[in-house]
């Protein structure tokens, strides 16, 4: 069970975060969990993506490539879930950001994802010039799609057969939320 505290992730905590993320990604493609990342089952987190996390957390919001991350911890201080917001790479999209989310296998279905999304949504609403949060989700990830709908996101489109992973075809669904 989580103690419900959400805190920003600092650069000094990134090694711990990537250990958590490695354990989280071990479930990707497992029969009980399905696919939640466009990666083959058992694939490591790509080094180039880790580098964008490390660089982005250090950048100001005025710089392309910024990223902000928050974690929820257990009473034992272990990371049980995370949410991140990041800038688009396009120059004229500074009013939008992208959301990423994950919850450790032992803590799913307890409302942690909803709390993390609400936290990121509140932060973005208080952070000019952000006006929209966007996300992409694998079409077979019904639990995540349901969570995002409950949080107020609406579907913007679906790319059929976007990914072919481990011999299976997956669509990619875009969703968005306009901030108040």
Image (cartoon, rainbow, N blue to C red):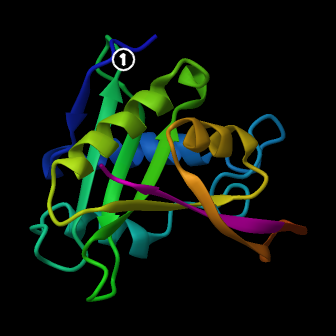
| Prevalent SS, magenta region | strand
Q: Position of residue 132 (x, y in %)?
A: 36, 62
- Can residue 27 be seen by looking at this rendering? no
Number of marks in the rendered image = 1
Say whether residue 22 is left or right of residue 147.
left
Q: Which residue is mark 1?
A: 74
Q: Residue at x 51, y 34 (%)?
A: 103
Write down the region rendered in magenta: 170-180
As drawn, 63 above or below 118? below
Q: Secondary structure at mark 1?
A: loop
Say whether residue 159 is left or right of residue 116.
right
Membership of 124 in magenta stretch: no
Q: Residue at x 66, y 46 (%)?
A: 145
Say whether residue 155 is left or right of residue 142.
left
Q: Position of residue 46 (x, y in %)?
A: 49, 69
Asked which quadrant contains residue 115, the reply is top left
The front one of 121 and 5 is 121
Q: Residue at x 33, y 44 (%)?
A: 121
The front one of 132 and 56 is 132
Residue that lies at the very extreme toward the right in this rendered image: 167
Membership of 172 in magenta stretch: yes
Q: How would you rate the neighbour count of disc 1 (Cα within 10 Å): few for under 14, some for 14-19, many for 20 or more?
A: some
Q: Position of residue 86 (x, y in %)?
A: 32, 64
């Amino acid at each position: 069970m989580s103690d419900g505290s959400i805190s920003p992730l600092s650069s000094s905590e990134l090694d711990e975060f990537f250990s958590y993320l490695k354990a989280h990604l071990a479930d990707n493609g497992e029969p009980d969990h399905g696919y939640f990342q466009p990666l083959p089952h058992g694939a490591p987190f790509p080094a180039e993506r880790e580098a964008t996390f490390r660089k982005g957390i250090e950048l100001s919001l005025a710089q392309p490539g910024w990223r902000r991350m928050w974690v929820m911890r257990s009473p034992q201080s272990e990371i049980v879930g995370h949410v991140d917001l990041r800038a688009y790479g396009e120059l004229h999209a500074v009013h939008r950001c992208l959301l990423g989310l994950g919850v450790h296998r032992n803590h799913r279905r307890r409302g942690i994802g909803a709390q993390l999304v609400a936290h990121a949504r509140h932060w973005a609403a208080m952070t000019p010039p952000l006006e929209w949060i966007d996300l992409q989700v694998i079409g077979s990830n019904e639990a995540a799609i349901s969570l995002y709908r409950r949080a107020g996101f609406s579907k913007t489109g679906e790319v059929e057969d976007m990914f072919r992973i481990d011999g299976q075809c997956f669509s990619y669904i875009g969703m968005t939320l306009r901030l108040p």
